[in-house]
Amino acid sequence: AQKITQTQPGMFVQEKEAVTLDCTYDTSDPSYGLFWYKQPSSGEMIFLIYQGSYDQQNATEGRYSLNFQKARKSANLVISASQLGDSAMYFCAMREVTSGSRLTFGEGTQLTVNP
Amino acid sequence: DAGITQSPRHKVTETGTPVTLRCHQTENHRYMYWYRQDPGHGLRLIHYSYGVKDTDKGEVSDGYSVSRSKTEDFLLTLESATSSQTSVYFCAISAGQGNTYSNQPQHFGDGTRLSIL
C-alpha cells in the first residue's frame, strides 16, 4: 500500500488566493513526522514545513501552514496569498520511527499560480 | 543553504560502464542519503548512511552500491550502468545525534542528471 498519497497531480490557483495541497498517509507507528518540500522548475528540493505526530498545534511557517488531521491521517499543506513564485512541484514525505531517519515521499502535486 | 555539493551535475554514459556520483557535505551531519527521481515516482531512496562505513539499503537499491569512508563524502556507484538507471539523482543530509533525528529535515543537493545510452 502507498504510504504517502497525493491525489492531485496538478492544481491551479489565482495569484493572491489560498490553495490547499492534499496529503494522506498510512502508518501504524504512533510516532512519525510529516514534511513538505517544494521543487521549482530549476530542480532543487526546498524544505518547507514539518509536523510531528505528537504536536498539539498545526505547524506554520510564514505563508505555509499544515492542516494536520491525525484521525483522518491527512497532512494538507495550505499556502496563503499565493505568489507566482509558488509555482512548483510540492512533495509530502513521512518519517516513521520504525524506518529510522529515512523519508518516504509521495508522487507530488504540480502547482501553477496564474496571474 | 546547506553545504551539499553533488558532482558531476550532468553525465552521459553508455550502457555497461561504471559510474560514480559524489556527494560532499560541509555540515558534519551524520546522515546521508541517495535518491533517484523519476516521473510518476517522486523520490525513491536508493541507499543511506548513518555514519562512517555504516550504510543500508533503501527501496530501490538493486544495481547500486555506496561507500562512506569520511563523514563528508558519500559515493554512489553504478557498477554496470543500464538504461533503466537514467534518472536524476539527489543526495540529502540530515542532522541528529543517536536517535534524535525525528524533527530534522533532510536537506538536498542540487541533483545529478544521469543519462545512460
Image (spheres, rainbow, N blue to C red):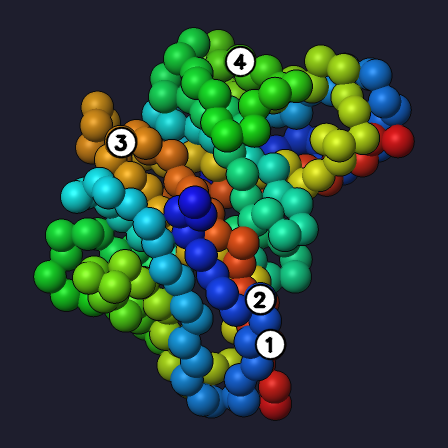
Q: Is residue A30 above or below residue A55?
A: above
Query: Counting residues from the N terminus, which is met first, the one under dot 1 or under dot 3?
Result: 3
Quarter location, residue A77: bottom left
- Comparing labels 4 and 3, the label whose residue is closer to the camera: 3
Categorize mark 1 by other alpha carbons within 10 Å: few (<14), some (14-19), many (20+).
many
Please, which chain is the residue tagged with disc 1 on? A
Please, which chain is the residue tagged with disc 3 on? A
Q: For the residues marked 2 and 4, what is the alpha-carbon distance in whole angstroms?
A: 35 Å
Asked whether the residues under the numbered discs 1 and 3 touch, taking CB atoms below 8 Å apart as contact, a structural biologist would say no
Give the residue pinned by disc 2: A9
Q: For the residues marked 4 and 3, what is the alpha-carbon distance in whole angstroms?
A: 24 Å
Asked whether the residues under the numbered discs 4 and 1 touch, taking CB atoms below 8 Å apart as contact, a structural biologist would say no
- Comparing labels 4 and 1, the label whose residue is closer to the camera: 1
Q: For the residues marked 1 and 2, what is the alpha-carbon distance in whole angstroms?
A: 11 Å
Image location (x, y in percent) of residue B5: 57, 35
Categorize mark 3 by other alpha carbons within 10 Å: few (<14), some (14-19), many (20+).
few
Q: For the residues marked 4 and 1, what is the alpha-carbon distance in whole angstroms?
A: 39 Å
Categorize mark 2 by other alpha carbons within 10 Å: few (<14), some (14-19), many (20+).
some
Q: Is residue B52 visible?
A: no
Give the residue pinned by disc 1: A112
Give the residue pinned by disc 4: B67
Please, which chain is the residue tagged with disc 2 on? A
Say which residue appears at 40% left-offset and 40% top-offset. Answer: A103
Q: What element carries label 4?
A: strand
Image location (x, y in percent) of residue A54: 13, 52
Give the residue pinned by disc 3: A98
